[in-house]
């Protein structure tokens, strides 16, 4: 790789890292704020909060990396054009292919990164996120439940304690269980304590009552007890086999699923669509660079506007990504739709490489250019001070 190629590689890759880190951090903050209750209402530390929310970063990088590469490529090409470096390189006899190879080197690095994240790191992060959140829920009474607060410990299960004494005794316990749509169970107890043994984790309640309200019955059934054990093992991660979703499966598990997997038996189309989406992920960085360079890589004078070319590049990238999204969604029930995304890649690569090889300049029609110029001039006149 020559000095010019090294210069382009460093500039593009540096811009890519800057954009990737900035966008990932911004989106991560917005997503992390949704789980701020881990620190507030559930009593977790800042390290637990950052650790849990940080596990979605690989998934964010998987989505953001191709877009960050597109922005970095467009930035570098605009910089080279504004400094007239592309024109000088072209006048010196440098072919567009030599300039294009430097950008493709960056695209290959990003493609390898996306492949690793798609195949292993993104599913691994989602698996760890599921396991960690389940572990947090398993310690619901001992570490999460705060006195004086109604704390949801699982979907449609809420617990409240009035006081926790130093010896671990819980005073004034209220538990509402609405998981069964046909029956609502409410437990109230004067006191209680945790019991952890080989059989599981239990909340031992003393002197209280259980109210069972069945659907269709006007009066609840009330049972008074002196001692009652509520099983907390159902909220723990170790007592039940964790069933990972499709997005939490590794690439090889999608390619070679277990024929006895109940999820695969029920929804084979989901496995197939997710597999092709993962396989197509590394192609997006390469295709985005081809499209961007086809529109913006040709030498132009300072009088030739690149704004419409930028719009064309963004439109081409958006169209390709839309085709891939639609192919994955509709390919669940119609397998032939999965071929659309590969057809889109073939058109993008074939058309883009042809334009680059021939050194063509993709410009909008003259009437569109003239129309934009007229509109811009009128707007400038109206905004100009009188």
Image: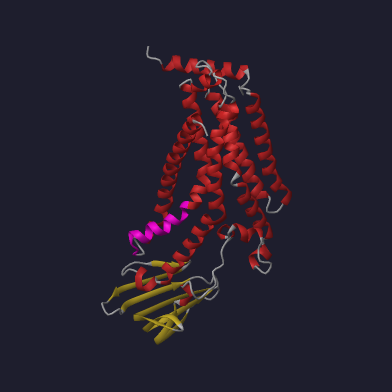
Q: Nearer the viewer, residue 250 or 317?
A: 250
Question: Along the horizontal axis of the image, is 250 left or right of 333?
Answer: left
Q: Magenta stretch?
A: 43-57
301 shown above or below 116: above
Residue at 58% across, 59% down: 250
Look at the picture and state if 76 lies above or below 161.
Answer: above
Q: Is residue 218 visible?
A: no
Q: Residue at x 60, y 20 (%)?
A: 368
Q: Position of residue 145 (x, y in %)?
A: 36, 69
* Residue 316 seen anywhere in this rendered image of the structure: yes
Could you say where residue 277 lies in the image, as x and y percent from the top left? Answer: 62, 50
Viewer-proximal residue among 109 and 300: 109
The x, y position of residue 224, in whole percent, is: 41, 85
Taking the spot 67% from the left edge, 49% from the top edge, the residue there is 330
Magenta stretch: helix, strand or loop mostly? helix
The residue depicted at 51 percent of the width and 38 percent of the height is 69
Q: How is the image coloured?
A: secondary structure
């Amino acid at each position: 790789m020559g000095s010019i190629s090294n210069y382009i590689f460093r500039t593009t890759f540096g811009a890519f890292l800057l954009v990737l880190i900035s966008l990932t951090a911004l989106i991560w903050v917005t997503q992390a704020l949704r789980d701020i209750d881990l620190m507030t209402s559930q009593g977790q530390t800042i390290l637990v909060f950052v650790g849990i929310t940080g596990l979605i970063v690989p998934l964010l990088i998987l989505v953001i990396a191709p877009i960050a590469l597109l922005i970095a490529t467009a930035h570098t090409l605009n910089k080279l054009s504004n400094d007239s470096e592309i024109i000088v390189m072209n006048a010196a006899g440098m072919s567009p292919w030599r300039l294009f190879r430097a950008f493709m080197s960056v695209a290959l690095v990003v493609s390898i990164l996306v492949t690793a994240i798609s195949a292993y790191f993104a599913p691994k992060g989602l698996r760890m996120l599921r396991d960690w959140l389940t572990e947090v829920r398993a310690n619901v009474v001992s570490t999460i439940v705060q006195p004086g607060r109604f704390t949801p410990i699982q979907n449609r299960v809420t617990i409240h304690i009035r006081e926790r004494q130093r010896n671990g005794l819980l005073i004034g316990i209220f538990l509402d269980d609405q998981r069964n749509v046909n029956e609502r169970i409410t437990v109230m107890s004067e006191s209680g304590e945790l019991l952890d043994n080989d059989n599981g984790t239990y909340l031992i309640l003393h002197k209280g009552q259980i109210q069972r309200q069945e659907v269709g019955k006007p009066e609840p059934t009330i049972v008074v007890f002196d001692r009652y054990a509520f099983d907390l093992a159902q909220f723990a991660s170790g007592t039940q086999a964790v069933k990972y979703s499709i997005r939490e499966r590794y690439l090889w598990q999608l390619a070679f699923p277990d024929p006895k997997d109940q999820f695969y038996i029920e929804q084979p189309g989901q496995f197939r669509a997710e597999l092709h989406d993962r396989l197509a992920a590394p192609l997006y960085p390469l295709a985005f660079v081809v499209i961007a360079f086809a529109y913006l890589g040709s030498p132009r004078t300072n009088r030739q506007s690149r704004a419409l070319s930028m719009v064309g590049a963004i439109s081409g990238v958006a169209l390709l990504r839309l085709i891939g999204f639609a192919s994955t969604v509709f390919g669940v029930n119609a397998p032939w739709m999965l071929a659309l995304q590969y057809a889109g890649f073939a058109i993008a690569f074939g058309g883009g490489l042809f334009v680059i090889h021939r050194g063509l300049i993709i410009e909008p029609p003259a009437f569109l250019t003239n129309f934009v110029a007229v509109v811009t001039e009128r707007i400038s006149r109206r905004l100009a001070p009188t």
